[in-house]
Each structure stands twice: as structure tokens, then as C-alpha cells.
Image (spheres, grey):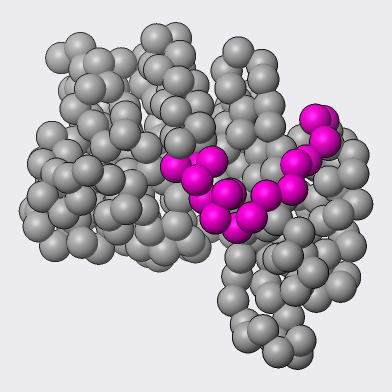
Amino acid sequence: MPLVLIAGFGEDSGKTTLAVSLVAALRRSGFNAAAFKPLGATRIWLHPSVLRVSSERGYLVTWDGYVLSKAVDGDPEMVNPVAGFTVPLDPFKGSGYSEVLSALRVSSCTGSRLHLYEPRTLEAAPPSLASSLLQVLEGVDPKPLPVSRGGLMRVIEEAGLEAADDCLKTLLSRSDVVVVESNSDVAAPTPLTARPDLVVAVAPGRAAIYRGDRWTLALSLVAPHRPHAAVVEEIVKLLKPLKILDLPLVEDPLEGIPENYIEAVIEEVESLAEKGSTGQG
């Protein structure tokens, strides 16, 4: 079962659009293709719709997770098991401007769920954003637990990565191919995704295809003990792509990229499937 990793040069590089497009194209080709976003975080001031969706669902739902789940008619919680919301600090309160993770959900594939939030970050955020997020947090299940900013990151590094890879193993056992979208500019979001069969690195208007085993080797050189700490730019500098693609502008991710632009990726996946790849690099 091939594991295809979509990695990007930054948060808005086009990863979600490419992942949605590839899953749709593979399904049209007869594959039982799944979409997966191990870790995700949404800027709630850019995608305020996630607050409404989270209230309706009773758990935090990221924008990427929601879009991918719609593409595969799946559950956003299982498509994106580790989900966070970020808020900007209010520069007029004297703390300086930065974007900070303020709330987090970690879900397991067995049905357990944890919500956390960081009170000090919300106190330093613009009041309208803080009150909107707090209103959502009041309605999630289970109730969120307050933790420090460092506590949020420790949960991601430990329970979060483990939960994400457990869900990915389940998907790999049930699917012909799993398309995994990384987060931000991270070269491999979890230990299991550091062993892909194929990688597509995407930037606005461009993408490049890489062999999974070469990507794994480069990760071992750049970040041998913490592959999720490596960024895409560090890895691509060490590798020669199989092919570079031009990508069109797409307004709606769910409309997708026309299939003729990603034919080379589909052909690589079909070749891997014929060889019986197992998602282990």
C-alpha cells in the first residue's frame, strides 16, 4: 500500500489542493485512495468557518482536515487526528506580534479524544478572537484542559505523533494508497511518514516528484533523530527530482487540479502499486 507524502514550501504552498486532486484522480483510476493529515493547525482569523464547524462537531476541526475529509467523504477527526488552532498575539498589548498555538485536539483511532488550551496565549490575543475561540472550547467534548505553551508542544511531540502514526497504520492496512499531507514546511510530520514510497514537494505553481527512499535517506542526514524537525527546503537541496511539474492556479481546493497536470504522479503511484509497496519506504 503506497504512502505518498505531499510536502510543501510553507503553509500556503498548495499542499491541500494537490492532496485533494491526487486522491480524486487515484479514485477515478480505481484505487481505494485515502487522504490523511497527521498534524494540522488553522489560523482562525483566516478561516473562521472552522469555529462554526468545530461547534457543530463538538471537537476542534482544522480547515485542511475539513477539506480533505469532504474530498473523501470521511470523518475530519480521523483524517486529521492532531488538530490545533493558532491565534496572533495582540501587538497593541505590548507583547509583540507572533502567531501562537492556543488550542489542541489529539484523537486516537480507538475513539478517545483530548482537548487542551493555553490560557496565557488567549489572554494576550485580540479580544474578539479570544472570545470566539473560548466560546467554541466551551462546547467541545471532552472539556479542554488548561496547559502551558510548552505543555502543548510536549503533547504533540509525544502522544500526538504516536496517535497520528497509529491512525496512519490503520489507513495503510485498509487502503490501496494513502496520500499524506504534511504541515507547514515540515519534510515529514511523523516517524512513519519519514519512510514514504513517493514524495511530491509543492510550491505555488510548481511541484517536484521524489523517490521515497531517497527522501528518507536525506532525512536521516539532516535530522537523524527527529525527522519532523527537518524542513522541505533542506531536503530538496540534497536530492534530484524524478520530474518537475507546472501547476495551475486553483481557486477552490475541492475543484482540484486538472488531472493532466498530475499524470506523472499518478503513473508513479500505479508503478508502486504494481510492485506492492507497503508504506515502509
Which quadrant, please, contains the N terminus?
top left
Give the image location of residue 205, x and y in percent. Answer: 38, 64
Give residue 255's quadrant in the image: top right
Q: From the viewer's perspective, is 53 left or right of 177? A: right
Question: Of 172 and 25, which appears nearest the observer?
Answer: 172
Question: Of 276 and 281, which appears nearest the observer?
Answer: 281
Q: From the viewer's perspective, is 142 left or right of 103? A: right
- Point 26% across, 37% down: residue: 194
Give the image location of residue 47, x and y in percent. Answer: 71, 59
Give the image location of residue 252, x and y in percent. Answer: 62, 53
- In this picture, which residue range is highlighted in magenta? 141-157
Give the image location of residue 141, x and y in percent. Answer: 82, 30
User: Is there any visible trace of residue 67 in the rendered image?
Assistant: no
Q: Measured along the vertical axis of the image, is residue 50 above or below residue 192? A: below
- Point 67% across, 72% down: residue: 88
- Point 52% across, 50% down: residue: 153
